[in-house]
Image (cartoon, coloured by chain):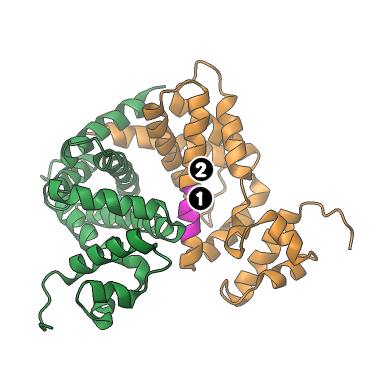
Chain colours: A orange, B green
């Protein structure tokens, strides 16, 4: 086996997804995931702290999101900085070639309470990253927290649509539509 | 032991909170919780499916929220129906005499990943209840989902403030302030 393993986290995630689909999350071990990916158990644990984490890609998404917020124009309001970052995610992370994997992944998550709990906690972590990135732009903490939560909501709406079986719109435009919708429904009295 | 046990879930939650504070969540068993509450293990499992659930009160909060949404005036918009329900929760569930318990409970949740994961999942469940209750008012599904998520956001902001050590404002007025804030920050471009 080569010592350098290109995209080990991606290969481990793909192997894990296959195994979870075939025999269920509960009935799959870390050793089996590593073997399917052609890697070792110790490589697995270099990238993920436990089996639950393998479908959540570590901190990559958090980092991309924080970078996107940091690179928004100085004049952008906090919520626009967040949705601009979501738009950038649509060009990098949530690209068209990732959609099928994301759909299958979501079906596995939906079927397992442990994974859904980890997913919920991850979303809270992503919101915290957004708050931090907004803080670095000088947005007051209280405003940053509300904007980040609104951003998380826009994200969730867009993501749910993006992985729908019959949807082919790109993530960025779904996020912009979701933002418009949140603004409209939020404004109704 | 009397056969009729008034407020068994409340007594079990209070006993569990004490024990989790004293010796940690991991080091507490269901039998110990039941004993501390002067109840039996089988009474525990009549009210809660597992140890994790004891601080989450089963479905009481979901039911109150759904009732609050159902009883909003017919002319109320979806988000106002939700925040009206939160206001009602402030008079019933999140009353002043519950605040100290809620503060201690939150400190225990924050210290334990398993409990935080259950909490995150519970919030998703509460959002689903709101969507359902809005659907029964004739709100289209898509609008109901966005309004429920905005309502959950308002709730979360208000709740975080309500359990702050130095805060004495009531839950309903914190929820109204949070709604105003969400509307303002959501509208900024």
Q: Residue at point 35% right, 55% down?
A: B108
Magenta residues, start to end:
A117-123
Q: Chain of mark 2?
A: A
Residue B83 percent across, percent down from the top left: 21, 42
Q: Residue at x 22, y 35 (%)?
A: B167
Provide residue A177's location: percent of width, then percent of height.
Answer: 45, 36
Res. B12 image quadrant: bottom left
What numbered label is drawn on residue A107? Answer: none
Tell me where residue A6 appears, x and y as whole percent.
81, 52
Locate the N terminus of chain B and report the quarter of the image it occupies. bottom left
Q: Nearer the viewer, residue B44 or A70?
A: B44
Q: Is residue B48 above or below residue A88?
A: below
User: Which quarter of the picture shows residue A95?
Assistant: top right
| Residue A119 magenta | yes
Task: Give the residue pinned by disc 2.
Answer: A126
Distance from the alpha carbon under mark 1 to that under mark 2: 6 Å
Left or right of residue B135, residue B117 in this image: right
Where disc 2 sits, the SS reads helix
Q: Secondary structure at mark 1?
A: helix
Q: Which residue is mark 1?
A: A122
The correct choice, above or below, for B70 with respect to B16 in the image is: above
Residues B21 and A26: in front is B21
> Could you tell whether A125 is left or right of B84 in the image?
right
Mainly helix, strand or loop, the magenta region? helix
Q: Are marks 1 and 2 in contact (CB under 8 Å)?
A: yes
């Amino acid at each position: 086996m080569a010592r350098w393993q290109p995209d080990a986290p991606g290969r481990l995630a793909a192997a894990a997804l296959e195994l979870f689909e075939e025999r269920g999350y509960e009935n799959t071990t870390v050793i089996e995931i590593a073997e399917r990916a052609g890697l070792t158990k110790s490589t697995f644990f270099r990238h993920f702290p436990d089996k639950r984490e393998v479908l959540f890609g570590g901190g990559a998404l958090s980092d991309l999101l924080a970078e996107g917020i940091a690179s928004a124009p100085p004049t952008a309001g906090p919520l626009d900085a967040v949705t601009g970052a979501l738009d950038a995610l649509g060009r990098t992370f949530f690209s068209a070639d990732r959609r099928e994997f994301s759909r299958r992944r979501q079906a596995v998550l939906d079927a397992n309470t442990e994974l859904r709990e980890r997913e919920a906690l991850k979303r809270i972590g992503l919101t915290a990253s957004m708050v931090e990135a907004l803080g670095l732009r000088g947005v007051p903490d209280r405003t940053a927290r509300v904007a980040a939560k609104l951003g998380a909501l826009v994200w969730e709406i867009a993501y749910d649509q993006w992985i729908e079986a019959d949807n082919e719109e790109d993530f960025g435009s779904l996020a912009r539509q979701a933002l418009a919708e949140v603004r409209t429904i939020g404004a109704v009295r």
